[in-house]
Image (cartoon, helix red, strand yellow):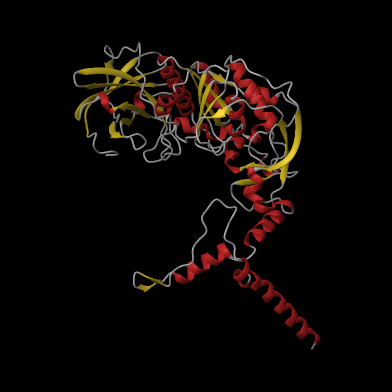
Amino acid sequence: MKRNIGNVIFVTACMTIGLIPLVGMSVAKTDTTTENRVLSEWPSLIEDGSFNVNFLPEAGTYFEDHFALRNQLVAADALVMGNVFGQSSTDTVLVGTDDWLYYTDSLDDYLGQNVVTERGAYNIANNLRIVQDKMTQERIGFAFTIAPNKNSLYDEHMPYYYRVKASDTNNREKVVPFLEQLSVRYIDLYGPFGQQSDVLYRAQDSHWNKKGAVLAYNTILDALGKEHDDLSGVPITRTKTEKGDLGISLYSIAAKPEWDYQYEYDSQFSYVTDTESWEDVWIQTESPGKSGSLLMFRDSFGNTLSPLIAEEYGQAAFSRDTVYHLDSRIATCQPDMVLFEIVERNLERFGQFARGDYSSGPPVMEAPYAGDVDVYSAAQEETNTTAEAFLSDLRPDYLCIFGQIDESVFSAETNVYVEVTAGGTSNVYEAYTVTDPETGSDNGYLMYLNTAQIPDGTFQVRVFTENADGDVVMVLDQQMDVSKETAGN
């Protein structure tokens, strides 16, 4: 009898606990979430005059999103999984030791897996060199820097099961030698960060802390030869007010603030744009008494770096475009210096291109003139090189000329030039060299051309390759037809 009573009490308790999330919806329904998505809405029983056959599963999804105490229970589950079992409840965050968290997307770089080929690394560096050449033609300075992945600098807290690596070389280590070979103005942050005894990244954030931002700021402006306050005489305090992005992503409302540094100085710059925060895609600033104008393409590492840089330029503009709209941004702010900053894990974006995929791609920039390359005495070969022309979805007044170079005339360091003849005028341009992220082919080329330079109808395209030995070969001669009235066709 006592056993039966105990069973009844146990079953009753389990049912009561299980009903709390459902019954609690009447007084404490969950209407907000810390997850980066929109919560589902209550489904309609009747749709378009007939019964909604998906009503029950849609109602179940609604309950999953809105049951009472959902955020608290999700946070509790994440805390137990992370702190007790050392496991992450989300696929975007890795749980390390001593409360350290890492961004999952940095794993390939850390493990040396899925690394770009030699040709893929050259494509990245070559495209940056092409941008630099175009800036030189326009009398604009150029520089490029890479923000280190957190586990590239501080891997002692990485999970033990990632100690065995696929290789000792990652994308950055393959690209940097090509940057040096091609004389791209590259500002190294790895050396200065590696020389510091202080930890310059936050344990539960994917970015550098404020002291790290100051080091990056000094390193970059020193390399640019820009006179600036190095902030060495500024009072520094430690505060514990901000939660890390990885902590919020994993633990949501249970994330705790972390220690960081605050530099106590009076800011001099002001916003020209209607700016809400440094998360904004486009920000312009001015700083009284300072000289120079800067256009900086940056990512979230710039949230703490950019305000420091803004202090030192008379005019500055900061873009968080995923694909860099370089020509249009330059037209807006007329800079005398262009700076690219990108985190290590996204370095591949500069060397990739796929139609319709705007998560990567070299800058949207009219191709530079090829300069001293002699295409008129080039030998001609019959190859399977391809070419297509279409109006850019990113900028409809720009024509894209895109194709694949036959492997028989392609090597690890091949450059591509495109001669366009239209309206009786011929010009030779240097094309980006790109990798197709879907097929993995590294033999692609891409160029943007303002449609004002071509008439409607037909025009002639001749494609040339130049290998490391300097030999130039014509690999395609083709008449093309594209309507400037129809984008993407």
Query: Quick check: can you spot residue 477?
Result: no
Residue 106 is situated, as x and y percent measured from the top left of the image, at 59, 38
Q: In which quarter of the image is residue 342?
A: top right
Q: x%, y% of residue 403?
A: 32, 31
Q: Position of residue 327 (x, y in %)?
A: 40, 26
Q: In this view, does 433 lie to the left or right of 62?
A: left
- Most foreground residue, 193 or 375: 193
Q: In this view, does 30 lie above or below 18?
A: above
Quarter of the rendering containing residue 163: top right
Residue at the image point whose x is 36% and y is 28% from the top: 445
Q: Nearer the viewer, residue 450 or 460?
A: 450
Task: Give the residue displayed 30% in from the left and 26% down from the top.
Answer: 450
Residue 367 in view of the camera: yes
On-image quarter of the N terminus: bottom right
Q: As drawn, is 137 to the left or to the right of 241?
A: left
Compared with 33, 265 (above or below) is above
Q: In this view, does 181 lie above or below 454?
A: above
